[in-house]
Amino acid sequence: MSLLKKFAAATFALTMTLSLAACGGSDAPAADSNEGGDAAKTYIIATDTTFAPFEFQNESGEYVGIDIDLLAAIAEDQGFEYELQSLGFNAAVQALEAGQADGVIAGMSITDERKEKFDFSEPYFDSGVVMGIAADNEEIKGYEDLAGKKVAVKIGTEGASFADSIKDQYGFETVVFDDSSAMYMDVTVGNSAACFEDYPVLGYGITQNVALKMVTEKEQGSSYGFAVGKEKNAELLEMFNAGLANLKENGKYQEILDTYIQE
Ligand code: GLN
């Protein structure tokens, strides 16, 4: 090998070493920042379509509501990114179960049955199921007046489970809908005699001129929680809980509730 060639080979080898070192050097900080969680991850969070005041579209077609605002404030507080998918309640829960979503926030009641499949955050809102009937219905005073009638329910919900649990005792049949607005409509047009819905949601609907009323006391119900898959996304659940605690402390949680729920 000539002297020149030797020099060229040595230079080449040195350049390679330097550039490899440079690669290693630039990789190192990225690897560090990924420790203890995937910093760059965008979580897929599924929700309902129409469940005011927790999630609904405003006049500009944007999703707003207690759940939507809480999630946004918690993500900002904890510094994580997410993509919201408005799938409908049952579809959202199924997407979570199938691993197509990382979390669900949809006024989702924390029930023992669901705890077998999902991990829940700390409860963030207390709810309960109540019967809704048409505003001009003077016949129905209680569950016993549902005998021989149809009752509208929303698929996969606590309200539907409650209706199922009493339908044989009171002798009514259930009709199943995908979303709350279709369920309400079936009652307002007089096809179903009643529906079962979460108390704060039906209450809010009535203030927004849904032609329904409540004539019975609400049933003891579960609280709402943010859900992730069982033993999955533990870091997301931790961030949700930490953010929720911060928002409760700094007044933002109450501010969000007050935006949507007036006395
Ligand atoms: N809270 C009810 C449930 O979890 C209904 C939720 C909803 O319709 N979005 O079953």
Image (cartoon, rainbow, N blue to C red):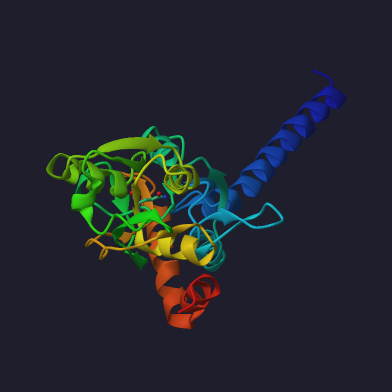
In percent of width and height, residue 238 lies at: 38, 60
Whether residue 121 is situated above or below residue 92 in the rendered picture? below
User: If the image is split into quadrants, where does the C terminus sit?
Assistant: bottom left
Q: Nearer the viewer, residue 63 or 219?
A: 219
Q: Residue furthest top?
A: 1
Q: Describe residue 206's horizontal placement relative to residue 151 as left or right.
A: right
Q: Position of 48 compared to 169: left or right?
A: right
Q: Is residue 40 among what the camera can see?
A: no
The N terminus, quarter of image = top right
Is residue 74 found left or right of 158 in the rendered image? right
The residue closer to the viewer here, 151 or 113, is 151
Q: Position of residue 163 (x, y in %)?
A: 25, 45
User: Looking at the image, which residue sits at the far right?
Assistant: 4
Residue visible at 22% across and 50% down? 145
Query: What x and y, as percent, mark residue 252?
Result: 51, 77
Most extreme residue toward the left is 169
- Nearest the viewer among 4 and 141 is 141
Q: Residue at x 51, y 40 (%)?
A: 87
Position in image of residue 115 (x %, y %): 24, 48
> Is 152 placed above or below 200 here?
above
